[in-house]
Image: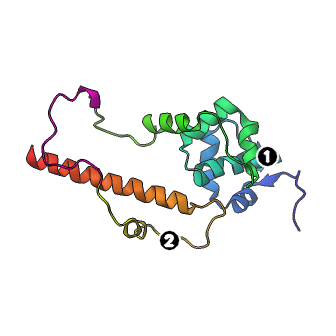
């Protein structure tokens, strides 16, 4: 028997509905202060309907639209909880002002969890040397399908999984990264 739409849900029910593990929901609670489940005896979590809609919107932004956690945090800060809750309906269009700026800014900022070492202090505009003649610095063509087949194939597809456009974009980015690595290897070899 299904619960009423306005009923509170346990973490296991929400995890099953969103098709994500419970530990991911607990992690999101630490990253998104707007998620506030009620906690009862024994620390059991109960999610309100608004919390479930917010989680659906966050899931769609992270998994369906490709945002980073920092990007979703910025959207919540700039556009509010209601705008993200509105994304719980899969037919709702994602339309935030300056959405590309938020993505770009979140990609430029280092993630807290990564612990990246050896970050560069120089800027590309400071480059004073000349480009080597005869080297084509454009990105080379690679077989996108070959790259994509290296990903682990899951079981049943999640409702908000990557679309064909996302796969194509991912393939282009991966081929660009391979070309960058080749250019760096060549520069280090010649240098």
150 displayed left or right of 98: left
Q: Which residue is mark 2?
A: 153
Residue plotted at (60% across, 36% down): 73
Q: Could you tell me residue 160's position as x and y percent?
A: 64, 59
Q: Front-most of 166 and 140?
A: 140
Q: Residue furthest bottom?
A: 155
Can residue 101 be spotted in the picture?
yes
Q: Residue furthest front?
A: 134
Q: Residues within 10 Å of mark 2 (few under 14, many from 20)?
A: few
Q: Earlier in the sequence, mark 1 or mark 2?
A: 1
Residues shaded magenta: 122-139
Q: Which residue is mark 1?
A: 40
Above or below, 5 against 51 in this view is below
Look at the image and tell me in which quarter the N terminus lies: bottom right
Q: Front-most of 77 and 185?
A: 185
Secondary element under disc 1, as helix, strand or loop, is loop
Q: Could you tell me residue 101's position as x and y percent?
A: 53, 34
């Amino acid at each position: 028997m299904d619960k009423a739409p306005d009923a509170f849900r346990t973490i296991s029910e929400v995890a099953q509905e969103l098709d994500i593990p419970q530990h991911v929901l607990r992690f999101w609670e630490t990253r998104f202060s707007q998620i506030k489940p009620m906690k009862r005896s024994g620390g059991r979590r109960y999610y309100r309907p608004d919390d479930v809609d917010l989680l659906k919107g966050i899931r769609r932004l992270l998994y369906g639209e490709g945002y980073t956690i920092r990007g979703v945090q910025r959207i919540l800060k700039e556009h509010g909880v209601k705008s993200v809750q509105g994304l719980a309906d899969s037919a709702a269009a994602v339309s935030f002002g300056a959405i590309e700026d938020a993505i770009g800014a979140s990609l430029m900022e280092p993630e807290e969890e990564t612990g990246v070492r050896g970050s560069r202090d120089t800027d590309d505009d400071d480059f004073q040397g000349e480009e080597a003649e005869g080297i084509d610095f454009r990105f080379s063509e690679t077989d996108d399908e070959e790259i994509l087949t290296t990903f682990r194939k899951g079981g049943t597809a999640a409702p908000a999984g990557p679309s064909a456009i996302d796969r194509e974009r991912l393939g282009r980015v991966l081929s660009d990264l391979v070309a960058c690595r080749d250019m760096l290897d060549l520069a280090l070899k010649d240098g």
